[in-house]
Every structure is written in structure tokens, then in C-alpha cells.
């Protein structure tokens, strides 16, 4: 099998993923997966598409991720994994789509408005 390439995005983070058949090694920016994401929550977030499709340990995965924070990067990688799995096998698509993993999350940080203190965004809305 050749190498499968996919891109995932979340907030300002962009993840490029390269899948090939192998023993299940995951490398992120030249570092081991477990050392890059130290918390279990982020690790499970990244591995969610692989667990859902039952392909955990079936691929060697190389990830290049940049921008954003650690959570945004984890979710960008999850998005890229989901897209790559659909390219590898089209039968995974309904499972991943049902969990909402193929949809790019459009939420971004609201910009700072002028005339407000520090990082204020908007005043709290009140009907009265």
C-alpha cells in the first residue's frame, strides 16, 4: 500500500497526516505520540477515529502539526485521522460521520473589540 495523505484543521491548528501500513507507531513533529500529548484525555481524543474503526495498531502514522494550542492540535489531528481513514477504506465513512468526526469545527476565537478593557469581546446581552 502507498502512503495516504490527509489534512485536518481546528481553530488555527493545521495537521498533515501520512498513513502507511505498519505496526501502529505514531510520530508527531518528530516526537513520540505519548510524549507529545501527555494527558490521557488528549491521547484518547486523537485515537478516537482509530478505535471506532478498529484499526488501532494497523498503521504507521507520521503527523506534522502547527499553529494553535495543544487541544486545537489534538482535534486537528483527530480530523485528519478521520479523513485519512475514509481515503483508506470507504466503509469507515458512515461510522465516522455518525460521530461527527468528518465535520470541520468552524468555531474560532472572537476578536477583541476596540474601546473595551483588555481582552473583552462583547458586553453581556440583557433584554432589560
Image: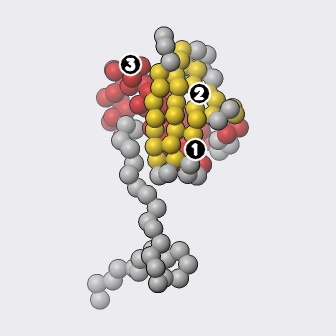
Residue beneath the point at 49% across and 76% down: 120
Badge 3 local density, few (<14 within 10 Å), some, or many (20+)?
few
Residue beneath the point at 46% across and 47% down: 10
Residue beneath the point at 41% across and 80% down: 123
Q: Find numbered disc 3 in the image and state the secondary structure of the residue it sits on.
A: loop
Q: Residue furthest front?
A: 114
Can residue 58 be seen here? The reply is no
In this view, the residue in front, 121 or 100, is 121
Residue 31 drawn at (x, y percent)? 69, 34
Residue beneath the point at 47% across and 52% down: 11
Badge 2 local density, few (<14 within 10 Å), some, or many (20+)?
many
User: Dividing the picture into quarters, in which one does residue 35 lie?
Assistant: top right
Residue 40 drawn at (x, y percent)? 62, 42
Above-or-below relation of 111 to 124: above
Nearer the N terminus, badge 3 or badge 1? Answer: 1
CA separation in Å, label 3 and label 1: 27 Å
Q: Find numbered disc 2 in the image and state the secondary structure of the residue it sits on.
A: strand
Residue 106 drawn at (x, y percent)? 38, 51
CA separation in Å, label 2 and label 1: 14 Å
Asked whether disc 2 touches disc 1, contact meaning CB atoms under 8 Å apart, the reply is no
Q: Which residue is mark 2?
A: 62
Q: Which residue is mark 1?
A: 66
Q: Which residue is mark 3?
A: 89
Amino acid at each position: 500500500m502507498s502512503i495516504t495523505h490527509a489534512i485536518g484543521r481546528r481553530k488555527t491548528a493545521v495537521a498533515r497526516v501520512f498513513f502507511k501500513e505498519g505496526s501502529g507507531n505514531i510520530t508527531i513533529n518528530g516526537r513520540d505520540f505519548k510524549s507529545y500529548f501527555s494527558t490521557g484525555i488528549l491521547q484518547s481524543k486523537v485515537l478516537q477515529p482509530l478505535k471506532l474503526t478498529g484499526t488501532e495498531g494497523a498503521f504507521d502514522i507520521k503527523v506534522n502539526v502547527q499553529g494553535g494550542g495543544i487541544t486545537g492540535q489534538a482535534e486537528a489531528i483527530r480530523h485528519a485521522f478521520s479523513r485519512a481513514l475514509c481515503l483508506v477504506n470507504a466503509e469507515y465513512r458512515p461510522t465516522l460521520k455518525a460521530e461527527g468526526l468528518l465535520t470541520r469545527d468552524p468555531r474560532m476565537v472572537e476578536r477583541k473589540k476596540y474601546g473595551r478593557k483588555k481582552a473583552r469581546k462583547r458586553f453581556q446581552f440583557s433584554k432589560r
